[in-house]
Image: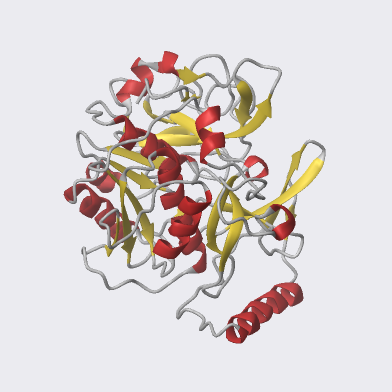
Amino acid sequence: MRKFLPVPVRVFSGWVLALFGAGLALGMVPQPAMALSHMGLVEREMHNGVAVLHRSVCARDPRPGHMHCHAHVRVQADGRPMPGKVGGTMAPNALTPNAILPSGYGPADLRSAYRLAVRGVPTTLAAAVDAYGYPNAEADLAVYRAQYGLPPCTVASGCLTVVNQRGGTKAPATDTGWAQEQALDIQMISAMCPNCRILLVQTDDDTTDNLAAGVALAAARGANAISNSYGGPEGGTHGYGPIYHHPGVAITASAGDDGYGAEFPASAPFVIAVGGTKLVRAPNVERGWKETVWTKSGSGCSTVFPKPAWQTDTLCTKRMMNDVAAVASPATGVAVYGPVGPTNTSGWIVFGGTSVGAPLIAGIYAAAGSHPTGARSLWMRHGFLFDVIAGTDGTCGGTYFCTAQAGYDGPTGNGTPKGKGAF
């Protein structure tokens, strides 16, 4: 059973002041408009008999018409991010002999788990749409890619482009949680498609209107795949469905981190809804890895959107989510180099949440090339996916809506990547 552990106010305040003081001592100036209220409660997840603590970096926004990101960061008991380096030692490059690697799965781990050898081509453009600004996007991405031996991807070279929702270069105000989300997004795209160009669209805020505008801009800029690691209630979203439909463009969305229940935009008919798993090494099985449902993954039957023609499940008469899944449990999370607090200080941290899967799957689509059928291929070619048959993300009367089974189920869709054949 998961327990919610509120971060003590005195400890949390001390952390903020400590980070602020450290920033001043290093000559750093805290970024303006850094929001701290976004942080979710600390949660407990058991892994191999050990309690793993994590929290959402974007708490649910109660205001109508607002979305929240789906990233979860591993934390210590006082709510601070868990150090993402084994022993806390910086390694100049993962290729260096005896280098101490970051905690969390890196690109080689993810490619091994999902049997991927996809590289992509420099002409392919993969996009991530997020709210607010992230001033260290290029610098943090450079550290991540150097650590894992990936080719540089800079603004000057044309590999990385960062724009606001109108296509301009004036960045929106910065928000810590959304900046962490952006680090996760562009680094997971890099892991799956290291030779792709990356477009990062930063919208003015987290409203449904502005995020949808970001998606429209990414499509207009020629993105081959567009990742959306956020969501919110379905109410009032029916009119936004067409904005998330661009034939020939793979538009992915994370399923949510609150357990069983449908969220938009993952529930939009033409979006590729990405659920979450717990991914662990398993030397005793042929694959070398095994997966079960992450207990907090979203899934469910839409109450708003019609069922796409290619969905063949029998109990949901409307759009059923999900279509596919990937690692999401923070206990088996991924390594990211990004903001560690409310200053412009960066470091290695470990992330989970269904926010991992949306850019990871978008990166695979981008690397795979042309994909005019979008989510349809995941239903038609499910033999190219690993079937996840154990676990649940909630209570649904024992149905596939929230319970894994052989074949299709809500939490993991048609399965997780097994090469690029399904993409």
* Camera-nearest residue between 183 and 278: 183
Q: Find residue 13 and report its image quarter.
A: bottom right
Front residue of 321/69: it is 69
* Rendered location of residue 334, percent (x, y): 57, 45
Where residue 69 appears, as percent x and y from the top left, is: 47, 54
Query: Is 216 in front, or is 188?
Result: 188
Q: Tell me the quarter of the image containing the C terminus.
A: top left
Vertical side of 337 occupied by 300: above or below: above
Q: Is residue 192 above or below residue 311?
A: below
Which of the image's four quarters has the N terminus?
A: top right
Is residue 232 shown to the viewer in this render? no
Residue shown at the point (44%, 64%) measured from the top left: 139
Q: Position of residue 340 (x, y in %)?
A: 59, 65
What residue is shown at x 67% (from left), y 29% (from top)? 281
What's the coloring here? secondary structure
Please state the horizontal and vertical placement of residue 170, each as a whole percent of the image: 28, 73
Residue at 65% from the left image edge and 55% from the top image edge = 84
Q: How many marks?
A: 0
The residue most toward the front is 97
308 relative position to 301: left or right: left
Answer above or below: position of 79 versus 125: below
Whether residue 98 can be seen here: yes
Query: Would residue 268 appear left or right of 71 to someone viewing this image?
Result: left
